[in-house]
Image: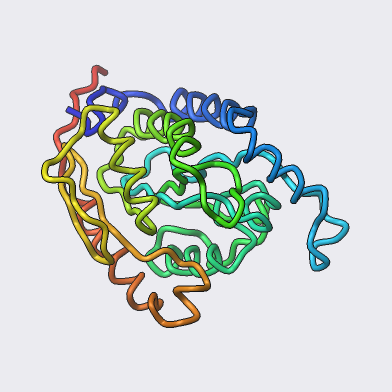
């Protein structure tokens, strides 16, 4: 049985891509959280001086990556002048630079840089998402905003049929991943605590923890490239373990 409890492993790539495209359209059209809508649009209407003249995305940011991913990376939310500007998760800011460089070193990304959503970056065996899809004031979504947004992550988990490992970047993403998995019937007890390098079996998935690649962590050395490489190496090892797949008819 597939980890998410379905039989999507027999789907052709085309139907899965189309289903994920539907989730993307639903994400981009969402206006469920008035505070986040107001903030993301206000930021887009008043670009930073460094980005003056650019057209900001100013909408919720969908997940991105390989429909055959075995690793799902879960972040907190788009940055106001990162994903909210470029329209792609972890793209156009220092956190994304740090993350995608590491994914490239791990063989999961086609290039080490992430500038804008049409820059040619492709992910191989990985999907990058977030617990909340709109840029929040002070990078702090409310619990209510998180709960309204998590069904999008649940939809991605249902469709990413080969996913085995989730990597939560920071405590908020770790908690969001646990909640999304619980909504799909994957639970563990006692509830695992977040920590860098923390590892927990959650139903048919493995959840790993990593400090968020924010400047607050990377500039102070709380998270180094070697530390992120180590967690990604562990994620790849776990993701490559064999799982029982449904038998497909010819």
Look at 46% across and 45% down and name the residue there: 129
Figure quadrant of residue 183: top left
Q: Is residue 250 above or below residue 199?
A: above
Look at 50% across and 37% down and name the residue there: 145
Taking the view exactly as shown, the residue that stands out farthest to the left is: 189
Q: Position of residue 34 (x, y in %)?
A: 64, 33
On the rendered image, what quadrant is the N terminus found in?
Answer: top left
On the rendered image, what quadrant is the C terminus found in?
Answer: top left
Look at 66% across and 61% down and name the residue there: 115
Depth check: 209 or 111 in front? 209
Taking the view exactly as shown, the residue that stands out farthest to the top is: 249
Decide if residue 35 is on the left or right side of residue 47. left
Decide if residue 87 is on the left or right side of residue 234. right
Q: Position of residue 226 (x, y in %)?
A: 35, 78
Q: Position of residue 201 (x, y in %)?
A: 15, 47
Decide if residue 40 is on the left or right side of residue 6. right
Give the colouring mode of the picture.
rainbow
């Amino acid at each position: 049985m597939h980890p998410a409890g379905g039989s999507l492993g027999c789907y052709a790539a085309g139907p899965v891509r189309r289903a994920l495209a539907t989730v993307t359209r639903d994400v981009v059209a969402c206006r469920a959280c008035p505070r986040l809508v107001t903030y993301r649009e206000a930021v887009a209407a008043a670009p930073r001086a460094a980005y003056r003249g650019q057209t900001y995305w100013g909408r919720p940011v969908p997940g991105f990556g390989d429909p055959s991913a075995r690793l799902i990376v879960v972040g907190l939310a788009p940055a106001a002048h990162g994903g909210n500007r470029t329209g792609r998760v972890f793209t156009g800011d220092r956190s994304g630079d740090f993350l995608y460089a590491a994914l490239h070193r791990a063989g999961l990304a086609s290039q080490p840089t992430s500038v804008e959503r049409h820059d040619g970056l492709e992910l191989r065996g990985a999907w990058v998402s977030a617990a909340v899809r709109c840029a929040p004031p002070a990078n702090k979504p409310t619990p209510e905003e998180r709960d309204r947004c998590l069904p999008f992550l649940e939809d991605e988990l249902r469709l990413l049929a080969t996913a085995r490992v989730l990597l939560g970047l920071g405590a908020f993403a770790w908690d969001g991943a646990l909640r999304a998995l619980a909504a799909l019937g994957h639970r563990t007890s006692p509830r695992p605590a977040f920590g860098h390098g923390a590892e927990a079996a959650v139903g048919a998935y493995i959840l790993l923890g990593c400090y968020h690649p924010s400047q607050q962590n990377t500039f102070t050395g709380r998270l180094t490239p070697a530390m992120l490489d180590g967690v990604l190496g562990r994620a790849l090892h776990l993701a490559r373990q064999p799982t029982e797949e449904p038998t497909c008819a010819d």
